[in-house]
Amino acid sequence: MEVAEGEEAIRRVQSLTQSGLSQVPPQYIQPPQTRPILPSHPPQTQHIPIIDLFGFDPTHIQSTRDSIARACRDWGAFHVINHGVPTSLLHHIRHAGLSFFNDLSMPDKLRYSCSPGAAASEGYGSRMLVNHDDADQVLDWRDYFDHHTFPLSRRNPNKWPEFPSGYRETVAKYGNEMKNLAQKLMALISESLGLRPSCIEDAAGELYQNITISYYPPCPQPELTLGLQSHSDMGFITLLIQDQVSGLQALKNCGGDSESWVTVEPLEDAILVILGDQTEIITNGKYKSCVHRAITNPDRARLSVAAFHDPAKTVRISPASELIDESSPAKYRGVVYGDYVKSWYTKGPEGKRNIDALLLES
Ligand SMILES: O=C(O)CCC(=O)C(=O)O
Ligand SMILES: [Fe+2]
C-alpha cells in the first residue's frame, strides 16, 4: 500500500521534534488532571523491588517465589536480575531499535508504517488507539515499532526493518529468549499462589507475544505531555528493558489514599516484569496489574523495548477455580480476551477502567 508520506510524516512525533518546535501542538497537551508532576530532587524513597533469580538455581527457588509473591502483591511490577538472558542480546536489541529511529530517514521509516485503523497492527506508528477521529483524544509523545513474534505463524521478519544489519535476527532471538523467561516467570507466579506451575500458561491457549520498541523524542514541554498515557497492560506479563534515560513511572497503591507515581529508574542489565490485567483476573485480584506511564524530558530521547505475553484472542479468561470458594468469591466476570482487547483499543486505557468494568458486585 502506498503511504501518503506528507500526511503520515506529520503524525510521527520524531518528525515534529526534528522541525525544532518550542511548543508542543495542542493535541499533545494533557488536561490538568493527567499532567505529570516532574520528579524533583532529592530522589524518591520508594523503589521497585529487585529480585535475584540466581539463574533459576533450584536451591534458591523457594525464597525467589516468596519474593515474587511479595512484589506481585505490593507493586505488580519488579526488576529481575540473573535472569539468564545474555546481556549482549539486551544491548543488541536496544542498539537495533535506536539505530532504526535515529539513522533511517523519515521516508525510509515510513515504508514500514502500520495500518492506521487497526489495533496493535505490526510496524511503525505513533498512535495507540484506533478511534482516530476523536477530537478529544490526547496524543502520546511517542513513536514505536511493533513486531509480531509468537505464535511463529504470525512471525514474518520481512515486515521488520532490514537496517541496521542483523535487526531481524536480533528481534527473533530476543523474542525467543523473552518467551522462555516469561514462561518461567508465569510458572513461578502461579506457584507463588499455590497454583500448578502451568496454570497461567494453560489459560493462554497459545501464548502470543508482541515486541514493541518505543522511542520518546525529547519534548520541549514535558510538564504538559506524557510519552505514554497511564495504563495497565492487557495481557499476562510484560518484560521491559529501557535505556539509561529514565521516564517510566509505576503507580504505587493505585486507588488508595497513598497513591503515588514512582519512577522506575533504569537498572543496567535488569529486566522489568509488569503484571497485566489477565494476571489480575486469573489470580482473582490477589495480584494486581501495575498501572504505569512514561513521562518525557526536554534533553534526551528515550528508548524502551517491551515484550508482551498475552492469551489467544479466542480464549475466555476467568479467575482460577482453585482460588475461589465461599469465603473468597470470584471478583471478576470472565472475558473473552479478544473482546477485552477491542474495548481497550476503542475506549482507551485510562488507568484501570477496562478491568474495573469486569468487577462483580461483592
Ligand atoms: O516505555 C516504557 O517504559 C513503557 C512502555 C509501555 O508501558 C508499553 O508499551 O505498554
Ligand atoms: Fe505498558
Image (spheres, helix red, strand yellow):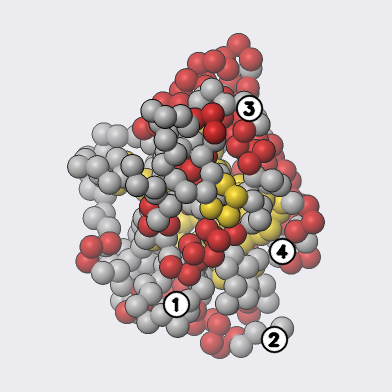
Q: Residue flagged by tag 4: what amino acid is it? A: Trp
Q: What residue is shown with label 4?
A: 160
Q: Residue at x 33, y 69 (%)?
A: 220
Mark 2 falls on what kind of element?
A: loop
- How much space separates mark 4 and mark 2, taking CA atoms? 17 Å
At horizontal 27% and vertical 58% (from top left) the residue drawn is 36
State whether label 1 is within 8 Å of ligand 1.
no
Regarding mark 1 in the picture, which secondary structure is present there?
helix
Question: First in sequence: mark 1 or mark 4?
Answer: 1
Mark 1 Cα-neighbour bin, 10 Å: few <14, some 14–19, many ≥20: some
Residue 19 to residue 302: above or below: below
- The image quarter containing residue 75 is top left
Foreground mark, 1 or 4? 4
Q: Is residue 60 above or below residue 252?
A: above
Q: Is mark 4 within 8 Å of ligand 1?
A: no
Label 3, label 1: how many angstroms apart (C-alpha)?
Answer: 47 Å
For label 1, the residue is: 16
Category of crowding for the residue at label 2, using alpha-carbon neighbours closer than 10 angstroms: few (below 14), some (14–19), many (at least 20): few
Quadrant the N terminus occupies: bottom right
Residue 88 percent across, percent down from the top left: 66, 39
Q: Which residue is mark 2?
A: 2
**What residue would you read off at disc 3?**
197
Q: Secondary structure at mark 3?
A: loop
User: Is 159 on the left or on the right of 279, as rendered?
Assistant: right
Pinpoint residue 213: horizontal percent, then vertical percent: 57, 57
Q: Is residue 159 above or below residue 212?
A: below
